[in-house]
Image (tube, rainbow, N blue to C red):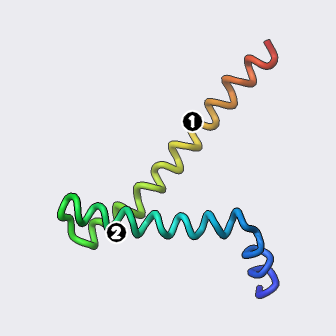
Amino acid sequence: MKKWLKTVLRNDSLLLSLVYTVGHIFIAALCAVLITGASLQLATIDALVEPIINGFWFYFLHVLWKKKFRKHEHA
């Protein structure tokens, strides 16, 4: 497990993505509290749920994008 963790952490892109994601969650929660006056609990839930929904949305768009451009490549 320790060797696996070291290997994962050596991957700059993965580590950067993890740090970015954690930062994104904190920033999103803070913005929701400051801008809307939401409770920290609701802001944190929003900061976690919103990126998950965006991830599914991105996947859906990516699948459609690949299908559209594969059709054009073979035409």
**Amino acid at dot 1:** Leu
**Amino acid at dot 2:** Thr
- Judging from the image, what secondary structure is the residue with disc 1 in? helix
62 or 15, nearer to the observer: 15
**Is residue 5 shown above or below 41?**
below
Q: Crowding at label 1, few (<14), some or many (≥20) Cα neighbours within 10 Å?
A: few
Most extreme residue toward the left is 37
Q: Work out which quarter of the rendered image holds the C terminus and state it.
A: top right
Say the numbered circle drawn on residue 44: 2
Tell whether 28 sits left or right of 34: right
Q: Quadrant of residue 30?
A: bottom left
Image coordinates of residue 67 in percent, x first then y, are 68, 27
**Is residue 68 shown above or below 35?**
above
Q: Residue at x 74, y 80 (%)?
A: 5
Q: Residue at x 48, y 68 (%)?
A: 23
- Judging from the image, what secondary structure is the residue with disc 2 in? helix
